[in-house]
Image (spheres, rainbow, N blue to C red):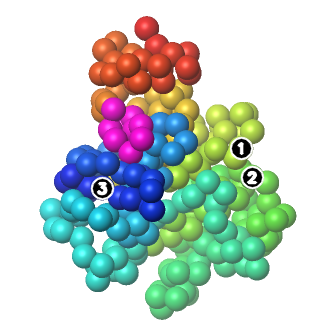
Amino acid sequence: MFAFDHVSVRFGATQALDDVSLTIEPGATTVLIGSSGSGKSTLLRSMVGLVRPQSGSIRFEGQPLADSDFTALRTRIGYVIQDGGLFPHLDGQQNVCLLAQHLGRDADWIEARWRELAQMVQLPADALSKFPTQLSGGQRQRVALMRALMLDPDVLLLDEPLGALDPIIRADLRAHLIEIFAKLNKTVVFVTHDIREAAALGGATVLLHDGRIEQAGTIGDMAAAPATPFVQRFLEAQGAGR
């Protein structure tokens, strides 16, 4: 779905991505993991054009991405950030339906779609009449997920969507997300710093450090044969090392 070829991104003196080559397979879940500042979010943001590389290239479905492509591409990509990114002056339903209304989708289709998504994410319909500040953290993230899925995108990008939740809600919502990903069969890229979360999500995992890929594979592969000393330290720090 995406192919990164020797991509580098610099913000001033900070090398956010350093010669990254990576393939994101279609219809699969890929987890980006690493400590703060490792380049996870920059890599994710580059997929939707919020960050443009200074060198290297990014391909989407085999075609090089140009600046002119991103407006159309964003209707094919759902994007969820850590705090949900909901508009505070709109209620839940308005947040979910905003882009579909802007694009002129049929009103009956919009209503049927948001009701379908509310059932999918297990959010009571009355919660959607509330504003973001009136919702719990878990409810806000479910609304953000509905918004990301509203146009039935090909790709779903999630940037630490569970990071701000308490452990019980986080575990429940993670389990529910895994069920949703399996049901939808979409290309999913999920950013986290939690190795247990990465293991639970399954699929390919990419461990980044200082803007470079340290190792890619399953968490089990990394634990059995860490490719670098950093991989070993990272696993041991989270209780997953040999």
156 is within the stretch colored magenta: no
Q: Earlier in the sequence, mark 1 or mark 3?
A: 3
Residue denoted by label 2: 137
Q: Residues within 10 Å of mark 2 (few under 14, many from 20)?
A: some
Residue denoted by label 3: 8
Residue found at the very far bottom of the displayed protein: 104
Tell me whether circle 2 and circle 1 mark residues in contact (CB < 8 Å). Answer: yes
Which three-letter amino acid code belongs to the residue tagged 1? Leu
Q: Earlier in the sequence, mark 3 or mark 2?
A: 3
Residue 211 image-quadrant placement: top left
Compared to residue 45, the image places residue 211 above or below, namely above
Compared to residue 10, the image places residue 175 above or below, namely above
Compared to residue 135, the image places residue 163 above or below, namely above
In the image, taking residue 127 as reference, residue 30 lies left or right, namely: left
Q: Nearer the viewer, residue 22 or 146?
A: 22
Residue depicted at 24% across the width and 62% down the height: 55
In the rendered image, residue 118, in percent from the top left (x then y), is placed at 62, 61
Residue depicted at 52% across the width and 52% down the height: 159
Q: Write the start and end of the magenta stretch as one range.
A: 206-214
